[in-house]
Image (cartoon, helix red, strand yellow):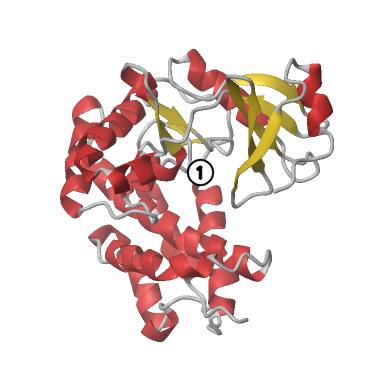
Amino acid sequence: MTPPDTAPAFLARHGWGGAEIRPLAGDASFRRYFRVHHGPRTAVLMDAPPEKEDSRPFLAIADHLTGLGFAAPRALAVDLDAGLILLEDFGDARVGPVLAADPTREQQVYEQAVDILAALHAHPAADVRPYDETELLREARLFADWYLPAVGCPEAPGFDAAWAALWPQVAAAPPVLVLRDYHADNLMILDRPGLQALGLLDFQDALAGHPAYDLASLLQDIRRTVSPALEAAMIDRYLGQRPGLDAESFRTAYDILAAQRNIKILGVFTRLYVRDGKAHYPAWHPRLWALVNADLARPALAPVAAWFDAHVPAATRRGVQVTA
């Protein structure tokens, strides 16, 4: 987490000369984040090497969200050639740690998060690619391509066909902007009113897809447990604000997309371990499997559940074993 050599000159060009740069965080991509201190002012420096990351979608979606009245971090300075962006600082009140320290706030915060989704989905999707069945299957196949080989389980035929039987059930609702990683660790509690009460992060991969996807991402969060009662209440709250949706079809799509997302993440986290050497990601596999097994029990998932029952033995559902 050493700042790039180009950071001091970049900051100096934009009025932050001599600022102190402290490590803040990294993520599953090649992006790194630093907090910049300049007197009483602070900002967040995003280092996204241009040969690894295209930051233009992040900037475009941030502009779109702020234009609609949502709290996305404003860009204070940009140098795409160097891969550096100076961002508004949303502080340290990330929803996950805040609720761990004070569980009494859970209901209120989740209501705010659901209200943001309902309000966002009232608007047409931005100019982004469709989150269609081709993309959904490509993601689901990360499980077959990465997880199965890592646990010594050969891929059996029928995986694609099992998912193909489900896609028509997620194509009915008009597409909305899907942020794709909408969960407690990507939401910041801000001292602002209304829809600005929660700051939005990690939306650069947004696509136009089904409105149930981000709700499933929020309520089936691998990093913190959301009770079945709260999950059900928040689905009801969302549907109450979007009376134009068919509730039964929405709930079916929710179940399918929750399963697709969690199965995809099993593949993603395995790839991060096997290919990128990030040894801590398999530690999440048991929690993911608990979610996946519950998702596969839903009636809408019957074709995919049958494939898993036939080809993914219980012994391989414990996660990838990390080697020294």
Where residue 22 sits in the image (x, y, percent)? 65, 39
Residue at horizontal 42%, vertical 58%? Answer: 262
Location of residue 141 with respect to 62 vertically, above or below: below
Residue 67 lies left or right of residue 190; in this view the side is right
In the picture, which quadrant includes the C terminus? bottom right
Residue at horizontal 46%, vertical 36%? Answer: 92
Location of residue 48 with respect to 36 vertically, above or below: below
Residue 34 lies left or right of residue 80; in this view the side is left
Residue at horizontal 72%, vertical 39%? Answer: 48
Quadrant hosting residue 261: bottom left
Q: Residues within 10 Å of mark 1 (few under 14, many from 20)?
A: some
Quadrant hosting residue 152: bottom right
Return the residue nearer the eye: 199 or 251: 199
Q: Would you name the residue on which mark 1 appears?
A: 132
Q: Residue furthest front?
A: 39
How many circles with numbers are drawn on the protein? Answer: 1
- Residue 127 visible: no
Q: For the residue marked with disc 1, what is the amino acid?
A: Asp
Residue at horizontal 57%, vertical 26%? Answer: 61
